[in-house]
Amino acid sequence: MLLLAHQRALLKLTQLILLFSMTELKTCTPVLTELGYQLENLYMDYIVRKQADKFEGKTFLHWIPTMERWSYRDLETITSRLAVSFQDLGWTKGKHVAVLMGNSPLHLFSVIALARAGLVAVPINTASKGALLTYYLNQSDSAAIIVDAELLNRLDAVDPEVVQRLSHIVLCGAEAADLPSGALSLESLAESAVNPIFVSDARPWDLAFLAYTSGTTGPSKGNMLSQAAALNFGLSNAEHHGYVESDVLYVCLPLFHVAGLMTATFGALLTGMSVGMTSRFSSSGFLADIEECQATVTNLLGSLCNFLWCQSPSERDKTTLRMVSAVPVPKYALEFEQRFGLKITSGYGLSDHGMVAAYTPADAPSKMGSSGRARRHYAVRIVDDNDIPLPPNSIGEILARVDIPWLASTGYYNMPAETLKANRNNWFHTGDIGYLDEDGYLFFTDRKKDAIRRRGENISAFEVEQIICTHPLIVNAVVYPVDAGGADDEVAVSVIRRCSSLTERDIVRFCSDNMAYYMVPRFISFSDQFPTTGTGKVQKHVLRSSVQADIGRIWDREKEGIQVRR
């Protein structure tokens, strides 16, 4: 209890410091961007009302799978109904609500409604299950959940005590007759009030989202994003990449990630653009989707660009797209631009902090491959291990800082020590490695963190290790990335087992039941003991080098024909 009180005191102190900073920097706030938004207006309820009044019947959302459309006025009406329904359930301002949903119109409307009502949305990766899902719900203090009906059975494997703390389970996509006892229908909540009278007291500095990113040297952290910070992901992207009202944004990235929801969709909302959205990325369906919604801009992960690039060129490659934001920028970027008739932009940002740098359409092609220069109100610094700034073209850790309050994450939820450590010496420490060239362009080179990047997901080696080590027949496990010849890292694990009856297939089966599909190791090797330092720490780099050198002979899940389902 004393530790918890200490944590809360530290978090309160951080908020008071930021409130003081807000007063001190008030002169900076009149014009945050060329779009004309002021800090005091960067909260969801104001934005939705303003855009509904301005754009009325203009299409806001075009849901490609069913060809349905909703206008800006529809957005305001539906989210008002949901916000009123949430309040009628007794969900008071500040309550944490988990959202376990795939892309859908009601997913988007729900998180916007939660923000309008002053509630805190906790988006959860739909691949989460077992121990990982238990952790997210427990660590976030989620007191209710909105979940797709097809994912409801995921709660069966969650710690019963955590499930019992959920005051409500709201299902999306369930027929009224099929609702489990005590569950509610999201569709019914969206239609319950004919003429909703909704009043919001949420403001820019109120907590709106807990955005979980991969753990690095510890468990996953919930980034506390205020209303202003969540909207600023999109505002910054819209400004620096030159979005205009006539643009149509294609969204195929998941809404449970900051990139899909805040950077892309909120950017369109703030600009008055139309959004064409689908359930997930499909290389075979991409061009047809672009044609259907007449998209002009989209955001893609570098690995998704690879899928498109590897398809046979065709006459359909020239589309309505004028710009693609790709992170990271593929090596064949110039050829990609020429083939598809568009411009590639890029940037550098983190859920832990905000949108830090941008490579824009105005930047020289010679700088392509960089993350661009620091965005408005942001500063970037490269430092050595003692936080001493390094000269241009010197590789070190990337640090960032913003000079306007509430535009960056306010820390890690219920992790004050980690929050203070990451923000030491008045700079946010990204844990990434890179350099600034003589013109101030940022080049990302590596990750200092103990994380693995695969298919657009940051995977915590620590988190995978912790889950694997809960198996009763495993003594220890060490997880690390290996190169198997593809565009991304592959997950490998070395295991010390208690008895030889435990097989690689047993480990895969256990992992599949207790973690997201993309975290399940592909390569598995058994050891009698791990190499250690003089102080007893496992030499992970020695294990990794040994496995990498013999990768063709290591047990490989894919060669065994084992598929891991979502």
Image: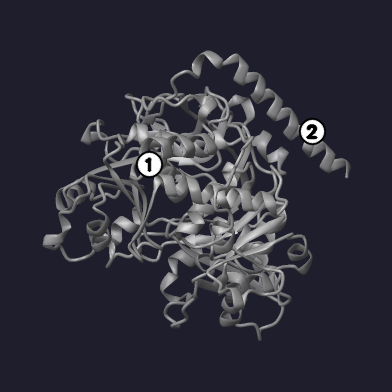
Residue 22, quarter of picture? top right
Mark 1 residue element: loop
Q: Which residue is mark 2?
A: 9
> In the figure, is residue 79 to the left or right of 71?
right
Q: Which residue is mark 1?
A: 56
Decide: few, some or many residues near mark 1? Use Cα within 10 Å; few <14, some 14-19, many ≥20.
some
In this orientation, which residue lies closer to the viewer: 492 or 357?
A: 357
> In the figure, is residue 296 to the left or right of 9?
left
Which residue extends farthest left?
A: 315
Which residue type carries mark 2?
Ala
Quarter that holds the N terminus: top right
**Labels 1 and 2: the sequence-earlier one:** 2
Circles 1 and 2: CB atoms closer than 8 Å: no
Could you tell me which residue is drawn at 27 percent across and 55 percent down? 293
> In the figure, is residue 89 to the left or right of 349?
right
Could you tell me which residue is drawn at 50 percent across and 36 percent down? 354
Could you tell me which residue is drawn at 68 percent across and 73 percent down? 157
Residue 555: x and y in percent read 49, 77
Decide: few, some or many residues near mark 2? Use Cα within 10 Å; few <14, some 14-19, many ≥20.
few
| Mark 1 or 2, closer to the camera | 1
Which residue extends farthest right?
A: 2
Which residue type carries mark 1?
Glu
- Gap in angstroms between the C-alphas marked 1 and 2: 45 Å
In this orientation, which residue lies closer to the viewer: 127 or 385?
A: 127
Could you tell me which residue is drawn at 29 percent across and 36 percent down? 244
Q: How is the image coloured?
A: one colour
In this orientation, which residue lies closer to the viewer: 427 or 282?
A: 282
Residue 496, above or below 295: below
* Residue 216 can be seen, yes or no: no
